Amino acid sequence: MATKRCKKSLPFWNSSIIGYPFFGRHRRSDDMSENVKIAVVGSGYVGLVASVCFAEVGHDVICVDNDERKVASLQAGNSLIHENGLPELLEKFGNTKVRFTTDLAEAVRECEVIFIAVGTPQNQAGDADLSFVEAVACEIARSLTSYRVIVEKSTVPVYTNEWVTRSMERNGAARHLFDVVSNPEFLREGTAVSDFLHPDRIVVGADSERAAAVLARIYLPLTSGSYYSQGGAIAGPCNAMYPPPLVLTSTKSAEIIKHASNAFLALKISFINAISNLCEAADANVEQVARGMGLDSRIGSKFLRPGIGYGGSCFPKDVAAFRSVAEQLGIDFNLLAEVEKINDQQKKRFIGKVRAALWTLRGKRIGVLGLAFKGETDDIRESPAIEIVKLLLAEGCSIVAYDPAAMNRTRDILPAGSNLDYATNAYSAAKDADALLILTDWAEFATLDLDRLNKTLRYPIIIDGRNLYHPDIMVKYGFTYVSVGRPAVHPVRDLASSSANI
Ligand code: NAD
């Protein structure tokens, strides 16, 4: 008997994980892209960058935020965040192709697609707090009168799309009037605009072909390459010959892709930090080890930079949330607990280096370079630099800190006082200090005038949590230089050298 062929077709995304022709990767680069009316809810690092970048590729955007102060500032042409390339795009599209409002109902009425890009911070239990996402979903539901695609742009745990669907139905949205898709964002603060327009890949998780097609239309200028061939396109690694692929998956897979990617990157950082500790114990050099490892194409050199641990608004909360998701699904993912443990220890080890270099800490004057969680951003959320500053203040040190962009935000949580002051440049932070700490990898901290710095410091001691300098150079300039995963160096006849057994 002939086997009966199964008529049931595979889900549409099964046939098209990468570069599905229908969705445009193989369309000609001179195809005209269609303008889509897009609402983006949330005008933070992701929402604002997404809004101006969607406008840059030709769409019309309404960016909604419930923070009236932010909206007023954006309407006046000012971004409240520091991000390369953002002021220019804001000037180009603000109040024309990108309108700012607090009125979500109006945006739902006018736009075919609504991206949710609100915060998903960590709650006390370590889970993602999805209450902002839920609030937006409920509000959208109450304004829905015709078909809309709701897009999870925020980083959310698997199954969130089902909860969004349920919440919308509970709030009166008829099921045929919407689809929920996942379109996680992989931009990095500091290079967010370029990352958004030149992504390694665009992930769209959709269980409805209709919704997937709408997302494909939005990204067509990128996936077809047409954006890159137009004059004035923002330059970056993608081009018309090599446009980014659209990775089409189920909604759940897309949700997991984002958490798994961030957890893997955090793991890479913790791994090299653990190796740096091993190198310190063995008197080896982690930079040499990282280079030797990173040249292996299976490993790659990115995220193999030792330091004081990862921070920011994403990795800490996403690793914790992913761990919690695994636990709820009955999966033993203890590896992530180790990643967190190593990350936490790295800051404490750094305090140990300061103590080893200075002996006692109470009353010591310390210059600090860097407060942001990484260079080129003003974001201080979960910044290891801030945590180190707090630990040193608790030890009785007095601190003078400098950061090119993050001082205003830091002042809000750590106001200047008797033991903490803010400097206007790196040399003022170093003035008469017992030691200078480098805590953020700002490019300008890697090119300091070392002669001037030596004369400015009370003692020429630099403790570098970002390995911005070569020890041989620092010793030539007369510094005791302590870094991460490399032997500390001391100038000849430096009395500190005998006690600085790091
Ligand atoms: P953010 O805190 O900078 O911005 C969130 C914005 O949402 C705020 O402006 C807030 O006022 C607004 N908001 C909150 N509730 C609202 C509501 N009910 N209606 C309208 N606006 C509301 O957050 P972010 O850094 O842009 O991150 C947003 C999401 O994207 C998070 O899930 C984050 O994990 C994810 N993500 C962030 C990055 C990053 O580098 N920052 C990268 C990728 C993904």
Image (tube, helix red, strand yellow):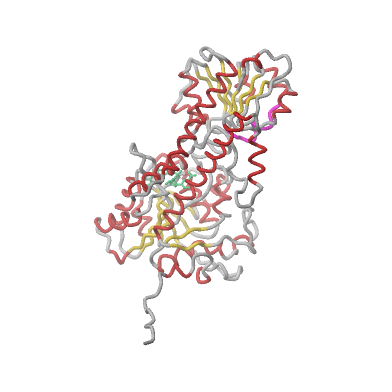
- Determine whether, in the image, residue 411 is placed left or right of residue 439: left
- Name the one closer to the observer, 70 or 48: 48
Residue at 35 percent across and 54 percent down: it is 159
Looking at the rendering, the stretch of residues picked out in magenta corresponds to 440-450
- Residue 345, percent across and down? 49, 30
- Determine whether, in the image, residue 369 is placed left or right of residue 127: right
- Determine whether, in the image, residue 317 is placed left or right of residue 355: left
Residue at 49 percent across and 50 percent down: it is 261
User: Is residue 277 within the magenta segment?
Assistant: no
Note whether 454 is above or below 136 in the view shown. Answer: above
- The quarter holding residue 281 reads top right
The N terminus, quarter of image: bottom left
Note whether 13 is above or below 398 in the view shown. Answer: below
User: Is residue 449 within the magenta segment?
Assistant: yes
- Name the one closer to the observer, 103 or 349: 349
- Residue 458, percent across and down? 64, 14
The C terminus, quarter of image: top right
Q: Residue furthest bottom?
A: 1
The image quadrant where one finds ligand 1 is top left
Q: How many marks?
A: 0
- Residue 61, percent across and down? 46, 55
Residue at 48 percent across and 58 percent down: it is 203
Note whether 36 is above or below 196 in the view shown. Answer: below
- Determine whether, in the image, residue 233 is placed left or right of residue 412: right
